[in-house]
Amino acid sequence: MKFSEAKSSAINALRTGDYRLAVRNDIDQNQLATGQISSFEAAEILMRARGPGECRKHHFLDTDVWILKPDNWYIKFYFLEKCWFVSFKTQAKEVP
């Protein structure tokens, strides 16, 4: 899957509610999972992502993991029947 396809599929999943949230110990860093942002807000943020993004193999699943960093956000997701969001968090701004 190419960047544009992954981004478009993830946005569509957020808009339709057809996604899942990966269970992690650090769930508080996933603002989508904690309800700090809605799925519609998340889709708007994801729309600002510009390619190519980063794509790497999942550490034990046979799928690609996408990492996008629009503006000051860190978004990590993959696809297994549905779109699974691992991280959706703001990053600390670097001080010059």
Image (spheres, grey):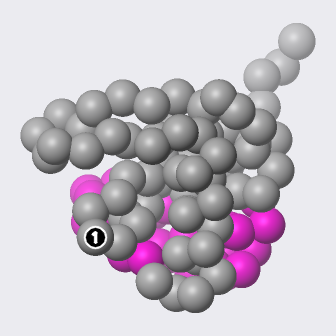
Q: Which residues are magenta?
A: 19-45
From the viewer's perspective, tell me whether residue 95 is left or right of residue 53: right
- Amino acid on which the number 1 mark rests in the picture: Glu
Magenta stretch holds residue 23: yes
Q: Is residue 25 left or right of residue 38?
A: left
Query: How many circles with numbers are drawn on the protein?
Result: 1
Magenta-span inclusion, residue 32: yes
Where is 51 relative to 28, above or below? Answer: above
Q: Position of residue 70 (x, y in %)?
A: 75, 42
What is the secondary structure assignment of the residue under circle 1? Answer: loop
Q: Residue at x 11, y 40 (%)?
A: 60
Viewer can see residue 36:
no
**Residue 67's spot in the image, x, y percent?**
52, 38
Q: Residue furthest top?
A: 96
| Image quadrant in which the N terminus is located | top left
Q: Residue at x 43, y 77 (%)?
A: 19
Counting other residues with Cα less than 10 Å from the Cα at mark 1, is it few (<14), some (14-19), or many (20 or more)?
A: few
Please name the residue shown 78% across and 22% down the image: 94
Which of the 4 image quarters holds residue 41? bottom right
Q: Which residue is mark 1?
A: 81
- Image spot of residue 72 (x, y percent): 76, 41
Q: Is residue 36 above or below residue 84?
A: below
Q: Outermost residue, left direction?
A: 60
Q: Quadrant of residue 11?
A: bottom right
Q: Quadrant of the C terminus?
A: top right
**Left or right of residue 24: residue 43:** right
Residue 86 in the image: state x and y as whole percent: 39, 55
